[in-house]
Image: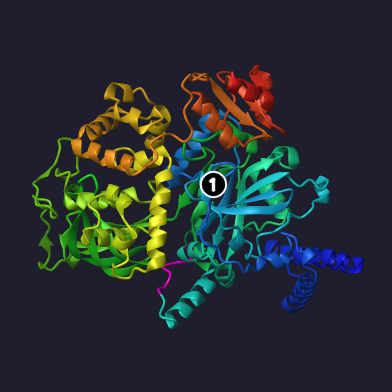
């Protein structure tokens, strides 16, 4: 059915009106029409699109109400990594941050921007030619979960960017923005009231509620949760912000606001760190008056050029820091101290507390870490104690209220034998940890399986601690390798298992066979080997076979692998039971080779690269991986020691600095030729 031209034009006008009223309502908080008038516009658009489905476009306001249910959330790689921020908890740590900034910028005038740190779920939104392409959770910083359908239900997220006459209608070809999804306090209270009436589990705090709501498989549930967002910056921007309109972070946020994004109004610029600290202190109590939760404030160097000069560490930008509010404290009582045996055999004491609400959630346990801390804090069973959440996350016992003691308290004696297998415990010289030395300890084995299947390791969905424990108790598995031998008939007769749940678990186990080598290395649970070290080992050796044959002398030549870690790795591979475990994994068909095979020639070894601008045939992360796979190194700042600057379309100040310093500049074609040499 052809669409009359008049109706085509009416749809265009309706969309433009709805988009503008969305911007006025969400972006500026200045609505010009009533909710009823807005609903009339939207109903008319829905009516026309229903009558003429060929008029529907991905950026139409009608697409906010998704009716489709997803089978799962797929992983999407960020265009540029979502790094976390370093934390400061007091005035001294803020002054240290300022000293580090001043040392690098060497006498330059530094302005700081201060923003509220919204307590929610960090997300990344990618727009291409002004249209929302996808929205992704932070995940591990490199890739996250695709929640585009859910994010489209949030009215404050524009599906289409506003045209800016002030900058010649210059909409970036690709724009990656970062923001924080949150749930207002009032909405959170209403949601929990409804869940309580329905006898459903309550959310602990607005942050958990927002995160859970944004990751629903049914977007209608997300839409009903009334989520909102504040945008706080960009990832990848093509062309760069400096060539678009601004040269500092504050003005950049105003530019994003003009594009249609919701930016928090509580943003201030200060001339020095002393003024910043004074301002932070005013929010200590004022934060409770906000309609949403914040857990601190973020301090950023204002100048975008200075941000580039400061660059990044492996995990954090050097030009920003999060000031976390002192944790809320509460009084509780230690009812018991119990020991947990971890995957490396460490015995960790945990205080079981009388439940108490701290920083918005109920706390009933606090890890005490080791015997020395119990002695240092003079903790006894029955003590009345002050607890807080370190960083507003981890419950911690701060101090004992000695005046509350009444002689009924009992000293806690650390066990001399493992509570799980009765093996005598050991404490090595120079360490605070007390360990069970029995590598076959049931607790160590159980915790090892928990780690093996966890996210970041083999990431087997549906294999939480309760399921693993059930499989162990049923005698279906002894260790993680046995997971790959499970059959449908093994699981179907277990309590609370049906056909679908069994099929899903078996499919997840099969899918895990294709995990990257670095995930497998991390999953093995080798002492001292975290995710970063596992990635380095996978990149360096390229296969599990090569890694198994290494020695400590070779290992310590790898950056970030020290003596202690090298010894731990070689000791692990020297144990017969571990090699038997690996052989069974290999027999099950686990991937044991790097998916990105490392170039044997290391043709870029010793060369240092800086990437700038937008690459047409790839993105910066892929280009960085290609360089590193050939032995090169990528840094964020140009200096005389830089070997090459790879310049894509619309390069920024790094390009100009390279010209001034005489650093060789490669275009994308030259860069690709260099990789192929």
Q: Position of residue 78 (x, y in %)?
A: 57, 45
Measuring 37% from the left and 63% from the top, which residue is drawn there?
A: 502
Q: Position of residue 95 (x, y in %)?
A: 46, 41
Measuring 59% from the left and 63% from the top, which residue is drawn there?
A: 150
Q: Residue furthest top?
A: 662
- Is residue 204 highlighted in magenta? yes
- Residue pointed to by mark 1: 299
Q: Overall secondary structure of the magenta stretch?
A: loop
On the rendered structure, is 569 left or right of 115? left
Q: Quadrant of the C terminus?
A: top right
Q: Quadrant of the N terminus?
A: bottom right
Residue 87 visible from this viewpoint: yes
Please identify the quarter of the rendering in which residue 23 is found: bottom right
Q: Which residues are magenta?
A: 201-207
On the rendered structure, is 384 left or right of 57? left
Please identify the quarter of the rendering in which residue 157 is found: bottom right
Looking at the image, is 153 positioned above or below residue 162? below
On the rendered structure, is 572 left or right of 588? left
Q: Position of residue 538 (x, y in %)?
A: 40, 33
On the rendered structure, is 87 left or right of 485? right
Looking at the image, is 250 positioned above or below residue 329? above
Comparing 496 with 406, the one in front is 496
């Amino acid at each position: 059915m052809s669409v009359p031209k008049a109706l085509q034009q009416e749809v265009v006008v309706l969309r433009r009106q709805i988009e503008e009223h969305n911007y006025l309502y969400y972006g500026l908080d200045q609505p010009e029409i009533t909710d009823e008038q807005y609903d009339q516009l939207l109903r008319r658009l829905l009516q026309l699109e229903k009558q003429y489905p060929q008029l529907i476009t991905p950026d139409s306001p009608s697409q906010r109400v998704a009716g489709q249910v997803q089978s799962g959330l797929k992983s999407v790689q960020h265009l540029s990594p979502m790094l976390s921020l370093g934390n400061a908890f007091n005035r001294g740590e803020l002054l240290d941050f300022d000293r580090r900034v001043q040392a690098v910028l060497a006498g330059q005038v530094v302005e700081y921007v201060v923003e509220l740190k919204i307590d929610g779920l960090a997300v990344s939104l990618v727009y291409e030619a002004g249209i929302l392409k996808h929205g992704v959770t932070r995940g591990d910083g490199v890739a996250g979960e695709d929640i585009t359908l859910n994010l489209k239900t949030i009215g404050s997220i524009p599906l289409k960017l506003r045209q800016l006459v002030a900058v010649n209608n210059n909409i970036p070809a690709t724009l990656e923005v970062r923001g924080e999804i949150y749930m207002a306090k009032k909405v959170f209270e209403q949601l929990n009231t409804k869940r309580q009436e329905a006898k459903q589990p309550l959310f602990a705090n607005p942050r958990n509620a927002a995160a859970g709501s944004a990751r629903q498989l049914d977007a209608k549930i997300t839409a009903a949760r009334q989520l909102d967002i504040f945008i706080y910056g960009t990832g990848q921007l093509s062309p760069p912000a400096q060539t678009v309109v601004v040269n500092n972070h504050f003005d950049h946020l105003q530019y994003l606001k003009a594009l249609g994004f919701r930016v928090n109004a509580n943003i201030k610029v200060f001339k020095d760190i002393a003024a910043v600290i004074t301002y932070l202190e005013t929010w200590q109590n004022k934060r409770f008056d906000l309609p949403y939760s914040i857990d601190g404030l973020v301090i950023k160097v204002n100048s975008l050029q200075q941000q580039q000069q400061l660059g990044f560490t492996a995990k954090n930008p050097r030009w920003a820091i999060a000031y976390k509010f002192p944790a809320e404290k509460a009084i509780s009582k230690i009812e018991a101290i119990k020991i947990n045996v971890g995957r490396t055999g460490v015995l960790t004491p945990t205080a079981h507390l009388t439940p108490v609400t701290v920083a918005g959630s109920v706390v009933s346990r606090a890890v005490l870490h080791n015997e020395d801390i119990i002695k240092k804090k003079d903790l006894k069973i029955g003590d009345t104690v002050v607890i807080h959440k370190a960083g507003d996350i981890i419950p911690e016992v701060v101090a004992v209220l000695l005046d509350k003691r009444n002689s009924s308290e009992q000293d806690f004696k650390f066990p001399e034998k493992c509570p799980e297998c009765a093996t005598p415990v050991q404490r090595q010289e120079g360490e605070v940890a007390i360990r069970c030395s029995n590598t076959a300890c049931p607790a160590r084995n159980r915790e090892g399986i928990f780690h093996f299947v966890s996210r970041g390791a083999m990431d087997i969905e549906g294999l939480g601690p309760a399921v693993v424990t059930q499989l162990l108790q049923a005698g279906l598995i002894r260790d993680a390798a046995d997971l790959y031998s499970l059959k449908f008939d093994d699981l179907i007769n277990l309590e609370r298992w049906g056909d679908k749940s069994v099929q899903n678990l078996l499919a997840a186990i099969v899918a895990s066979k294709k995990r990257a080598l670095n995930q497998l290395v991390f999953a093995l649970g080798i002492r001292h080997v975290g995710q970063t070290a596992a990635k380095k080992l996978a990149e360096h050796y390229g296969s599990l076979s090569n890694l198994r044959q290494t020695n400590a002398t070779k290992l310590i030549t790898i950056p970030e692998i020290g003596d202690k870690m090298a010894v731990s790795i070689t000791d692990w591979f020297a144990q017969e039971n571990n090699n038997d475990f690996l052989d069974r994994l290999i027999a099950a068909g686990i991937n044991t080779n790097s998916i990105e095979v490392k170039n044997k020639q290391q043709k870029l070894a010793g060369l240092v690269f800086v990437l700038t601008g937008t690459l047409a045939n790839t993105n910066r992360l892929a280009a960085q991986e290609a360089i590193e796979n050939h032995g090169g190194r990528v840094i964020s700042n140009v200096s005389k020691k830089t070997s090459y600057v790879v310049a894509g379309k619309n390069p920024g100040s790094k390009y100009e600095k390279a010209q001034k310093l005489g650093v060789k500049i490669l275009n994308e074609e030259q860069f690709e030729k260099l990789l192929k040499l």
